[in-house]
Image: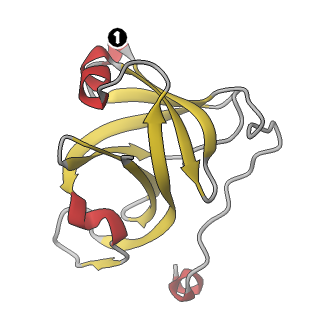
Amino acid sequence: MPRFLVQEHHARRLHYDFRLEMGGVLKSWAIPKGPSLNPADKRLAVLVDDHPLEYFAFEGIIPDGEYGAGHVVVWDKGEYYLLEGDDPEEELKRGKIVMELNGGILKGGFILLRMKKRGDRDWLLIKKKDDYSTSKWAIQRALTPEKEKL
């Protein structure tokens, strides 16, 4: 079963990196407001560079001057499977990934949808209505010792 990962990333601006294991790498999207369990929220997800699978458990500080400099902590992780199609890379090319997430926080159906008129990098992450969705969602920042310094 392929894995997913969400990292809380304190770079120039706080954002959340959503990563899906596929094709031997972590396909990655930066989500400025973070993922949501509220189906009414359509979160901008900007496709960024692939990351190696070894990055799956990374937490720590990326030094100044390096790509993505700042503090990174794992916010959620788990497994995913497709609800439509059978090849994640084909669904990525198609511009629509319909999946079920089974993580500690993110559970149930989600859709990653490429925004056609905005280029190849701009996508939306949308929660599907199911037993795990809620209109009362408020993202919680990860609890880390360094949090007080940020």
Image point 52% across, 78% down: which residue? 150
Residue 53 in picture, x, y percent from top left: 23, 59
Give the residue pinned by disc 1: 117
Taking the image as shown, residue 32 lies to the left or right of residue 20, namely right
Q: Is residue 18 visible?
A: no
Residue 143 showing in the rendered view:
yes
Q: Which residue lies at the image location 69% right of the left edge and 29% below the top edge?
A: 39
Q: Nearer the viewer, residue 2 or 44?
A: 2
Residue 41 falls in which quadrant of the image? top right
> Quick one: 63 or 59, which is closer to the camera?
59
Under circle 1, the secondary element is helix
Q: Amino acid at mark 1?
A: Lys
Above or below, 12 against 120 in this view is: below
Crowding around mark 1 (Cα neighbors within 10 Å: few <14, some 14 to 19, many 20+) is few
**Of residues 56 and 65, the one drawn nearer to the viewer in this rendering:** 56
Q: Is residue 142 above or below residue 2?
A: below
Would residue 137 be found to the left or right of residue 41 on screen?
Answer: right
Q: Residue at x 40, y 27 (%)?
A: 123
